Every structure is written in C-alpha cells, then in structure tokens.
Image: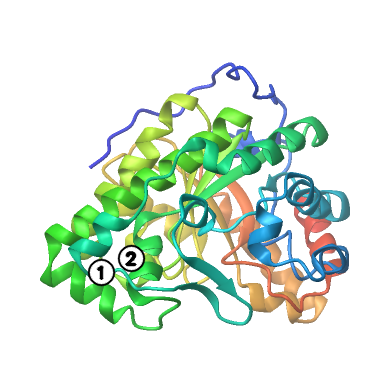
Amino acid sequence: MSQTTPLPRQSAPSGRRELPEAPFLAAARGERPARTPVWFMRQAGRSLPEYRALREGVPMLDACFDPEMLAEITLQPVRRHGVDAAILFSDIVVPLKAAGVDIDIVPGTGPVAAAPVRDLAAVKALPELEPEQVSKVADGVRLLVERLGETPLIGFAGAPFTLASYLIEGGPSRNHEHTKALMHSEPELWHQLAGRLADVALTFLRAQLDAGVDAVQLFDSWAGALSERDYREFVLPHSAKVLAGVADHGVPRIHFGVGTGELLAAMRDAGADVVGVDWRIPLDEAVRRLGHSGRAPEKIAVQGNLDPALLHASWPVLEAEVRRIVEEGKAADGHIFNLGHGVLPGVDPDVLTRVVGLVHEL
C-alpha cells in the first residue's frame, strides 16, 4: 500500500509554469480558492462543432499523434467554456499504440485489440514504451504550455487494470469475464501483465510531466467492476506504482473510476491527492468514506460529480443539481467541480458554458 506524504507547494520544475493563483491547483492541494474550479471530462470532443470540423476525416489516433491538432483540440473548450483546467486530448490506448501494440479505436465501439492477451507468451510479447515513441504527444504538451496562459494543463494515462481489461477482453466488455477469470486463476500471470502496463502508464505520464503538464489524472474506468478486496489485492499495487512514480514531480495526482463508490478509500490509498467521484454517491458521503482511508487525517480533495445525463435536463433541474453538488463539495478540504463521467456527444455546448458560469458564481 502506498503511504505518501501530503502534496507540498513546490517550485515548478524546469519547463513547468508557475501558476500560484490557479483555482484548480489550489483545490487539488486541499485549499479553498476564491471560486470553485470546474472542468469536464471529455470537454474536448464530439460535443463541440469546432472539434467535429477539425477531426473530419482524421482517425482518432492520428489526431492524438499530431501535435498541432491535439493542442488545438485541447484549447477549444478552454476558449469556449472558460473552464479552470485543460485536459490533454489523447486516449488511454495511445501509449500502447505508440509502443507497437496492435490496437485501434473503432468508431462506435472503442478500443479493440487485434489479438487478446491471455497467456504468458502474449504478456512477454508486449513491448515496452520508450519516451521517444510518445515524443509527438510531448511536443503537443509544449505547444499547450506556450498557449494556455494561466490555465493549468492536466495530463493523463489509463490505469493498469483498465488497460489490461481491454487487452484481455480484446475490446470493451460489460462483465470483464476473461479479465476476472485470468486474475483469479493465474494471479502470477496477472501481476506480470499489470506490472508491465504500470510501466507503460508511468513512462507516458513522465513524458507529459517532463513536457510541462501541471497535474495528472489516472483513469481506471472499469475498476468499479471489482470488489474492494480484489481491488486491493490485484489492482492497488500497480496503480500505486504509477502514482508513486510521478510523486517527485510535485503535481496533483487525480485518480478516477466509474462505479467506484465502494473503492474510494482504496483508491486514495493507492496514492491519489484528489479522488474523482462518479454520480452514484453524494460528495459529502464520498468525503466520509475517504476519511476512513489509511492516509487520513490528511486533507481530502474530491472531484465531481454531476450525472452527465442531466446536461440534457431543463435548466431549473440542472441548476438545482449543480447547486447541490457545490454545497456537498464543501465537506471536502478541496473540491473541483466536474461530471461523474465524460461529456456525452449530444450535449449542447452552451449548456456546459452556462454550468461553468453558475459554478463560478456560487
């Protein structure tokens, strides 16, 4: 189990901006900035007409390796919505693709691996990621550092469990049956695979950090499929390796998963400074659960947690939900307003802009 010390204020390493007044970074440190910061997962994407126009005819992964395009896509929601943080336009399978794994993003499906990884030979055949293989991503980060002004930039990677699930299942899965079967029946093989994927994620995050990102988020999208016991035995050590491996950069580390209400304390124990919370439990209850983490009584910072579907509701309904979440977020030492998952493609972008304005007023 990772028992890290509280995140200190540090001078920015060479190449990283000094942003002492950024509300997002203050909240991530467990402080109360003058306004509640807000950003949205998947804020750069299909909800924006300017994104659809730029991406027309360009495959997703091609866009992720084009420094100018990924920088422009990352900037689009900052210009339009006035959010308090930008998140790098990328995908969790980018480092796998860069390393040489035969994986692609199939429109309407998601990441699909050409050959599922389910035995020792396949695990041993997985290539390691070298920093130069994601140099185009790092170049995009450097462009963003120049262009974002005072807005922090969040880098990210997929957590070992979620990456492993895509590789073992061969693509998205509802039940993760092959993953769970391998995890329990061949635990040694599982830990070899998860360990290799932790190295991939860590190399990817370090490349982004060296290029200047101001925070990182580790996405464990499918960890909610696990019990806390299984998470602590099979997943936590590998996520902890990733989060501990970037600790010396002195930036906030956010850990997020979907359906992880029962795992929040364990996810904090993995080394997170900020724990992302989906919409299934109130933030004040999430704070209570996080207080039972082995890392208590350190400051507790949370991120979340508006149900993305409610962006389609009437404004009075949506406004009431935003006000409730901001109020419940006061139970934490620091609160970053966000969704409980990503922006849905059909959302009216003007609604997102209006939500940002409301959060800033409260």
The answer, for residue 247, to whether it is visible in the render is yes
| Residue that carries the numbered disc 2 in the rendered image | 262
Q: Is residue 15 left or right of residue 10?
A: right
Residue 358: image quadrant is bottom right
- For residue 316, above or below residue 154: below
Amino acid bearing label 1 = Ser
**Which residue is at the front of the view, 55 or 27?**
55
Q: How is the image coloured?
A: rainbow
Q: Position of residue 252 (x, y in %)?
A: 52, 36
Residue at 12% over, 67% down: 186
Where is 117 relative to 25, above or below?
below
Q: Position of residue 55 (x, y in %)?
A: 79, 65
Residue 235 shows in this picture? no
Dot 2 alpha-carbon crowd within 10 angstroms: few under 14, some 14 to 19, many 20 or more: some
For the residues labelled 2 and 1, say whether their Cβ atoms are less than 8 Å apart.
Answer: yes
Considering depth in this image, is 41 or 323 the residue closer to the camera?
A: 41
Q: Is residue 230 above or below residue 249?
A: below
Residue drawn at (34%, 73%) of the image: 116
**Which residue is rendered at x = 63% and y = 37% of the image?**
138
* Percent coordinates x, y for residue 127 in the rendering: 37, 51
**Residue depth check, mark 2 versus mark 1: number of the one nearer the observer:** 1
Spatial CA distance of label 2 from label 1 is 8 Å
- Mark carried by residue 227: 1
Q: Is residue 281 left or right of residue 26?
A: left
Residue type at numbered disc 2: Glu
Image mark for residue 200: none
Q: Secondary structure at mark 1?
A: loop
Which part of the image, by quadrant, shows the N terminus? top left
Q: Position of residue 244 (x, y in %)?
A: 35, 35
Q: Give the quadrant of residue 16.
A: top right
Disc 1 residue crowd, few under 14, some 14–19, many 20+, Cα 10 Å: few
Element type where label 2 sits in the image = helix
